[in-house]
Amino acid sequence: MTPQTNPTSTNTHSPTPARTSPLGMDNFVPSRNLLGTKGAAGNDIYIQIYSHQAKTAAFLVPAVAEPMLVWVVRGSAIVEEREIGGDWQTSHVKSHDFFLTHSHSPYEIRWQANDDTPFEVMHLYLPIPLLETVARKTPKQTGQSYSCFLGEVSGIRDEKVSTFLGLIYNEITSTQPSSLTYIEGIVQSLTVHLVRQYGRSDKDAKNSGSRLPAHRLHRVQSYFRDHLDEKFDLDICAKEAGLSPYHFSRLFKKTTGTTPSHYFIAQKIAKSQQLMRETDLSILEISLMLGYESSSHFSKIFKRETGVTPRQYRQK
């Protein structure tokens, strides 16, 4: 595993999809990826180290198939997360606290650093085959095995997690070539601990319910992206998914955590933020491009979704 330095990689602020890959996450996190490590073919280990700006406005993070750990390397911050359209959940984090995300749904996040200390975090994605193997071979006291699904963790301290991730961080930032064998051994031990400590039962996993198949979600997502200048139409969206409006709405919410209409609004807001950052278009021009009848209507929705007006957002 050879570290790859990438000090100029920044978020391209593309409209956020519901899902991406570990390799694609750089396109959506508005921070510098200081170091990326690609696992050799077959091991699927991927690690990112981000140097975050002191404060960021809310942005959408697409889901990934792999469980993602975010470990605070240095600094402290107030981090807020929420499902799309949900209530903000606040975590006060400092060095060696961690987050664990294993969700099929995108979510929003924002943060504010507490001081001038660089706010640096490391992302590690657990390989699905490894997680499945560990879950199958890790019995519970009842004799039953864990499911290969991990619960969500937000901004807590776990000394074992810190020990494992600290070893990995030191290995990939060392001046000597990093050892894939060494990192694989640590990741395997880390995975065993996570399954034991945060693994969900088979019953809980089965109760998660049906979800919208990925190919149907992709068709709807593409429709949203190509029709941001139009009003939301549930019937057309359901037709794109090949389902009745009722079943489409139900499965879409189970898959993404929000309703189709609110997801569409979130995509409009994400696109407007991109346009405000990257162009000199007026607020009125952006409003009309996104299908709003007036800038006042757009501004009202923008503030409801982000907490600030478009003008305030542009001045940040």
Image (cartoon, rainbow, N blue to C red):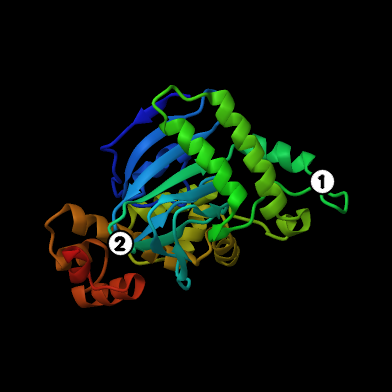
Q: Quadrant of the C terminus?
A: bottom left
Res 243 → quadrant: bottom right
> Tag count in the figure?
2
35 sits to left or right of 90: left
Tell me the crowding category of disc 2: few under 14, some 14 to 19, or many 20 or more residues within 10 angstroms, Cα based.
few
The amino acid sitting under disc 1 is Pro
Q: Nearer the viewer, mark 1 or mark 2?
A: 2
Residue beneath the point at 37% across and 62% down: 110
Q: Whole-percent x and y of residue 267? A: 36, 59
Q: Whole-percent x and y of residue 215? A: 53, 45
Mark pair 1, 2: CA separation: 44 Å
Res 184 → quadrant: top right
Q: Is residue 114 above or below residue 24?
A: below
Q: Whole-percent x and y of residue 11? A: 30, 46
Res 133 → quadrant: top right
- Whether residue 96 is visible here, answered yes or no, is yes
Q: Whole-percent x and y of residue 292? A: 26, 70
Q: Nearer the viewer, residue 246 or 308?
A: 308
- Whether residue 213 is visible here, answered yes or no, is no
Q: Nearer the viewer, residue 36 or 208?
A: 36
Q: Which residue is mark 2?
A: 115
Return the residue found at the far right.
143
219 sits to left or right of 14: right
Q: Nearer the viewer, residue 311 or 117?
A: 117
The amino acid sitting under disc 2 is Asp
Tell me the crowding category of disc 1: few under 14, some 14 to 19, or many 20 or more residues within 10 angstroms, Cα based.
few
Residue beneath the point at 51% across and 51% down: 217
284 sits to left or right of 2: left
Element on which disc 1 rests: loop
| First in residue order: circle 1 vs circle 2 | 2
Q: Which residue is mark 1?
A: 139
